């Protein structure tokens, strides 16, 4: 099960591309395609290794004006599917963000 305190991160072998109304993912390892709707696309964007699952749920609750309790189960299920399909890995802690280390 996905840990609410875990930090999902997209795998490098997955290519993402916007296509008309959908967002497409292509896993180069197994050749599978995935089509995401707007919310799925936003979850994918937030899987950058710097947001915990709980933070992703909080962000979506604010952006879509929905109760966290309503979103939590769906987001966890979505992330579990991503992990099972080897599209993401779950990190124990946040990765250092490029934004947190500005260059001078």
Image (tube, grey):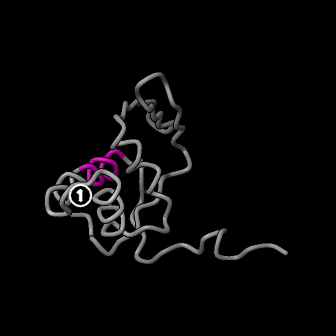
Residue interval drawn in magenta: 78-85
> Which residue occupies the extreme front position in the image?
65
**Snapshot quadrant of residue 80:** bottom left
Q: In the displayed structure, would residue 69 be above or below residue 41?
A: below
Q: Is residue 55 left or right of residue 93?
A: left
Residue 9 location, x and y as percent?
46, 59
* Prevailing secondary structure class for the magenta stretch in the rendered image: helix
Q: Is residue 45 left or right of residue 81?
A: right
Q: Quadrant of the C terminus?
A: bottom right
Residue 55 location, x and y as percent?
36, 68
Circle count: 1
Q: Is residue 100 left or right of residue 62?
A: right
**Snapshot quadrant of residue 38:** top left
Which of 61 and 36 lies nearest the eye of the viewer?
Answer: 61
Q: Residues within 10 Å of mark 1 (few under 14, many from 20)?
A: some
> Which residue occupies the extreme right position in the image?
104
Residue 81 location, x and y as percent?
27, 47
> Who's the residue at 38% across and 51% down the image?
43
Q: Which residue is mark 1?
A: 76
Q: Is residue 59 left or right of residue 47?
A: left
> Who's the residue at 34% across and 44% down the image?
85
> Who's the residue at 40% across and 30% down the image?
32
> Who's the residue at 41% across and 28% down the image?
22
Residue 86 location, x and y as percent?
39, 48
Q: Secondary structure at mark 1?
A: helix
Q: Quadrant of the N terminus?
A: bottom left
């Amino acid at each position: 099960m996905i840990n609410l305190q875990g930090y999902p991160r997209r795998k490098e072998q997955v290519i993402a591309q916007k296509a008309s109304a959908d967002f497409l993912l292509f896993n180069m390892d197994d050749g599978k395609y995935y089509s995401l709707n707007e919310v799925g696309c936003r979850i994918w964007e937030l899987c950058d290794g710097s947001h915990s699952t709980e933070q992703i749920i909080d962000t979506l609750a604010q952006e879509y004006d929905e109760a966290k309790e309503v979103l939590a189960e769906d987001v966890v299920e979505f992330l579990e599917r991503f992990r099972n399909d080897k599209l993401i890995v779950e990190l124990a802690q946040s990765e250092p963000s490029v934004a947190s280390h500005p260059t001078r």
